[in-house]
Image: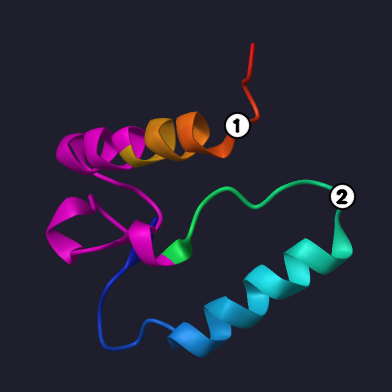
Amino acid sequence: PIVNIDSTPSDESYDQLTEDLKNAYDFPVISDYKNYKMDQDLFFDTVYHLNDEGVIVRTEKLIEDIRNSGILEE
């Protein structure tokens, strides 16, 4: 998750990180970081720890990304 506050790195920084990951490693990038930018009220004590509500929101997003990725095709 990425906390959406004034000091959050720019979208361009995250776009570059996504491209770097795609180019450096042999695995799919299944999530768009923009979907994981969350309001500060979904975080617990730091920008690294979600609260109970934030955990649910992030988990639902990740489940959707996994389902849409095709990596679990039967």
Q: Quadrant of residue 17?
A: bottom right
Q: CA distance from mark 2 to mark 1?
A: 16 Å
Q: Secondary structure at mark 1?
A: loop
Q: Which mark is residue 33?
A: none
Residue occupying the point 18% across, 52% down: 42
Amino acid type, mark 2: Asp
Residue occupying the point 15% across, 38% down: 53
Q: Position of residue 45 (x, y in %)?
A: 26, 54
Image quadrant where one finds the N terminus: bottom left
Q: Residues within 10 Å of mark 1 (few under 14, many from 20)?
A: few
Q: Along the line of sight, which residue is nearer the eye, 42 or 46?
A: 42
Residue occupying the point 54% across, 77% down: 14
71 versus 3 height, above or below? above
**Which circle, 2 or 1, is nearer the viewer?**
1
Q: Which mark is residue 26?
A: 2
Q: Position of residue 59 (x, y in %)?
A: 35, 33
Would residue 49 be counted in the magenta stretch? Answer: yes
Return the residue at label 1: 70
Q: Secondary structure at mark 2?
A: loop
Would residue 17 be counted in the magenta stretch? Answer: no
